[in-house]
Image (cartoon, rainbow, N blue to C red):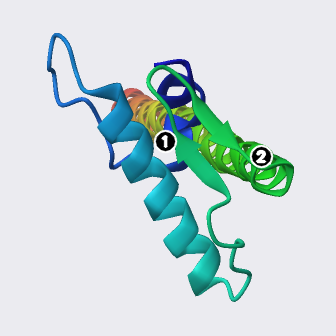
Amino acid sequence: KEFFNRFRVLCPSITAKGNADPDYKELSKRILAEMEAKFEREKNPVEAKSWQVGRSKVFLKEDLQGRLESSIGEALKSFVIRIQKRYRGFVLKKRYRAMRKAAGLLQASLRTLRAVTAYRAEKARTQACFTLQASFRMAG
């Protein structure tokens, strides 16, 4: 159980699948077999019989133990990077939405200001026309 809980980050596909009392011995063997296959694919195979599963413990040779520990570090690093990536994406998306909303508000305010300025200019022009007409009527 200790082995499975410690090294399960190496093979996230291997899970207890919701069993109340999973067979940790079998799960540990599957993790070790998958890690051996991974080391083979990386052209860095482990020596034969470098691990053995007892009744309640998993016995590892020192070389394999060290490689598994370093693999845990790499796996955790990739998980941390993935979490950081998602968090940064979330923060930037939130910031983008806020900027887009602010830009929309700014554009609306500028359109309103332009419309108010145009209205005031038209009102002043109309008032000037009325004043001219009134003064022509008085003079004429």
Q: Mark 1 falls on what kind of element?
A: helix
Image point (51%, 53%), residue name: 32
Residue in front for this viewpoint, 127 or 77? 77
- Where is residue 111 shown, x and y percent of the image? 44, 41
- Crowdedness near tag 1: few (<14), some (14–19) or many (≥20) residues, C-alpha within 10 Å: few
Residue 17 horizontal side relative to residue 62, left or right? left
The quarter in which the C terminus is drawn is: top left
Determine which of the numbered discs, if any, sits on residue 50 in the image.
none
User: For the residue marked with disc 2, what is the amino acid?
Assistant: Gln
56 shown above or below 16: above
- Where is residue 25 shown, x and y percent of the image? 37, 32
User: Tag 2 or tag 1, which sits nearer the N-term?
Assistant: 2
The quarter in which the N terminus is drawn is: top left
60 shown above or below 5: below
* Marks 1/2: CA–CA distance: 52 Å
Residue 22, image quadrant: top left
Q: Mark 2 falls on what kind of element?
A: helix
- Say if mark 1 contacts mark 2, CB within 8 Å: no
- Where is residue 55 shown, x and y percent of the image? 44, 24
Residue 111 visible, this angle: yes
Of discs 1 and 2, which sits in the foreground? 2
Image point (62%, 51%), residue name: 51
- Crowdedness near tag 2: few (<14), some (14–19) or many (≥20) residues, C-alpha within 10 Å: some
Instruction: Count how many numbered circles sit on residues in the image.
Output: 2
Residue 3 horizontal side relative to residue 29, left or right? right
- Where is residue 33 shown, x and y percent of the image? 45, 61
Image point (77%, 46%), residue name: 65
Residue that label 2 marks: 65
User: For the residue marked with disc 1, what is the amino acid?
Assistant: Arg
Residue in front for this viewpoint, 45 or 9? 45
Residue that label 1 marks: 100
Q: Residue furthest bottom?
A: 43
